[in-house]
Image (cartoon, rainbow, N blue to C red):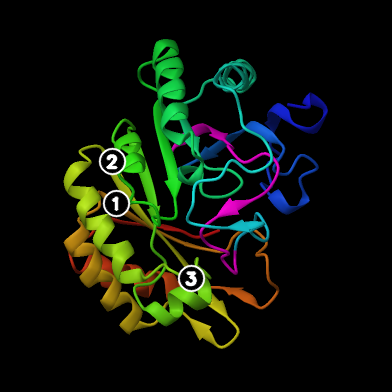
Amino acid sequence: MDSQRFLLYAKCPPSGECLRCPYRGRSITYGPFRSRRRGTSIGINLFLGRKVCSFNCVYCFRGKTSIKTMTPVSGDYDIPPGLLHEALNEALRNAGEVRAVDFSGNGEPTLHPRFSEYVDVVVDFVKKIDPDISVGVFTNSSTLGMGKVVEALLKLDYVEAKLDTVIQWKFRAINRPYKTLNIDDVMRNLRIFRKKFSETLVVQIMLVKYLNMANWGIRDAELMADALTVIEPDEVHVYTAYRTPRLETVSRAREEVMHTYGKVLENRGLKVELYIR
């Protein structure tokens, strides 16, 4: 690997505006972040050269997907486990007290062909430093039907899985998924995964308006509540686009809209956190 083209660790500015970051997509580890969700945390980016994802979400603050795929691919660089170990050491040495380390970064981390191997490296390294540090992943839920991915996820403390809508045409409009993906399959795989995963499962919902279509109506909330009561996540996190969206035609949800949406879910017995900024 050409060390001039990537970093082991990038310190993130408080704004968190990834599209303006001079190191965008070129650092293995980054942070620290201070959030209500995970406390002070470090992110792990497995795709150093390009954004590899099964979605191309209209609101994504990381920009356009370079490689949209459902086939595991390593991007421009394949990170040796020893280098990941070195990057984690650099991050934890510079970030101060850390409560969580999460796979996230430039795309869908579970699409990396060595994701399972990297999970073993991170869990082993982090737990030796501090068993109380939570190791997790932020995923778009598209790969939960892949046996090897699920096997790796079961080793983690925390999984935050995206589910912005349960309506297929809105799924295609907002998330712009790979052509073979269907929202019913995504929900079914989430239900199956929940039965296997005994640690913390959070479902993340991003409420936005794109052109003349929004995913925050009462009917949207009712259908989402139907799906989530079957999936049974530990928590539901409801967001809007607080970072600058990729497309200018994307609008944030108003605060009152988010409260109304969240109330529908709460009335069905779900534990809901609203993230309004």
Query: Mark 1 and 2 residues: CB-CB less than 8 Å, in contact?
Result: yes
Amino acid at pointer 2: Thr
Residue 50 is a magenta residue: yes
Choose mark 3 or mark 1, whichever is in front: 3
The alpha-carbon separation of the residues under discs 3 and 1 comes to: 29 Å
Query: In the rendered structure, which disc, 3 or 1, sits on the residue that comes first in sequence?
Result: 3
Amino acid at pointer 1: Glu
- What is the chief secondary structure element of the magenta stretch? loop
Image point 33% across, 82% down: which residue?
Answer: 218
Residue segment shown in magenta: 37-59
Q: Quadrant of residue 248?
A: bottom right
Q: Which mark is residue 235?
A: 1
Residue 83 shown left or right of residue 205 in the figure: right
- Dot 2, how many residues are within 10 Å of its Cα: few (below 14), some (14-19), or many (20+)? some
Q: Which mark is residue 179?
A: 3
Residue 62 shown left or right of residue 198 in the figure: right
Q: Quadrant of residue 151?
A: top left
Choose mark 3 or mark 2, whichever is in front: 3
Secondary structure at badge 3 equals loop
Q: Quadrant of the N terminus?
A: top right
Choose mark 1 or mark 2, whichever is in front: 2
Residue 88 is a magenta residue: no
